[in-house]
Image (spheres, grey):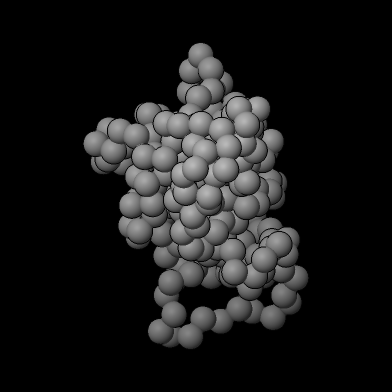
Amino acid sequence: MIRLIVLLSALAVAIGVSASIRLPPATPAPAAARSDLTVVELFTSQGCSSCPPANANLGILAQRQDILALSWGVTYWDQLGWKDTFASDAYTRRQRDYQRGLGTDNVWTPQVVVDGRRHVVGQRMAQIEALIARHDPFTGPQIVIRNGGVGLAGGRAPVAPADVWLVRYEPRPIEVPVARGENGGSTLPHANVVRELVRLGDWSGTTRGFRLPAAARPDLKTAVLIQAPNGGPILNAARG
């Protein structure tokens, strides 16, 4: 209960609320903030012929309540005749950060990164499941997402300030007809497509709150990641 009060106080600062925030007795969900989520990120491209099976795998994982599945469209296959309709330079940079953080020689698709700690080829569902099974308890702060803000409290202070990322993603599966390139003539399924990535600030171990910017669309889902910088491990994650 004390932790909940601290979290909600941080959130009140973030959204400029002077009065105390009270939860009804039957509403415990904001305090829980699902600290047991496993974060599964797929780096994919509509111009990559190897990616459709990985997209399908992520679609299966996106249905699990214990997993935060995110699909990032990258830009470096756009020159093959089809420009990915979801790709962003920011998402390509995120994968480049993982290249450094995970110590890989290059970036490639389809790549799945689990909790920012381990990676595997996206078509290999059995190996993805094995990495999910190795999920370690997060050490970062508890997260409350509520009333246009996010509050952080508790957790083990990181060695270096961690990034606080706001992620907004599609709430429903999307099928995209591809007219040209390696997947020309196919309709590709996508799940949990990321539409927005915003760095809210950093976290060094103290109680903090942030106001969330308005979403481009009201139907997008919200997630917050606390992550060591430069493609480091994810310290905690929550869905709004």
217 horizontally vs 28: left or right: right
Tell me the quadrant of the picture where the N terminus can be found. Answer: bottom left
25 or 119: nearer the eye?
119
Of the pair 97 and 139, the residue shown nearer to us: 97
Point out residue 83 in the picture as x, y percentages from the top left corner. 64, 38
* x, y percent for residue 225: 54, 48
Residue at x 51%, y 63% (from the top left corner): 171
State whether residue 147 appears in this view.
Answer: yes
* Above-or-below relation of 225 to 91: below
Q: Is residue 165 visible?
A: no
Residue occupying image coordinates x 46% and y 44%: 186
Report the label total: 0
Position of residue 205 in the picture relative to residue 138 (left or right) = right
- Residue under the point 62% across and 52% down: 195
Residue 47, given in percent of the width and then of the height, sits at 55, 34
Q: Residue at x 71, y 62 (%)?
A: 216
Q: Quadrant of residue 33?
A: bottom left
| Residue 56 image point, x, y percent | 37, 46
Q: Is residue 29 above or below residue 100?
A: below
Residue 32, quarter of picture: bottom left
Rendered view: 28 above or below 132: below
Q: Nearer the viewer, residue 10 or 193?
A: 193
User: Is 106 or 11 nearer to us in this picture?
Assistant: 106
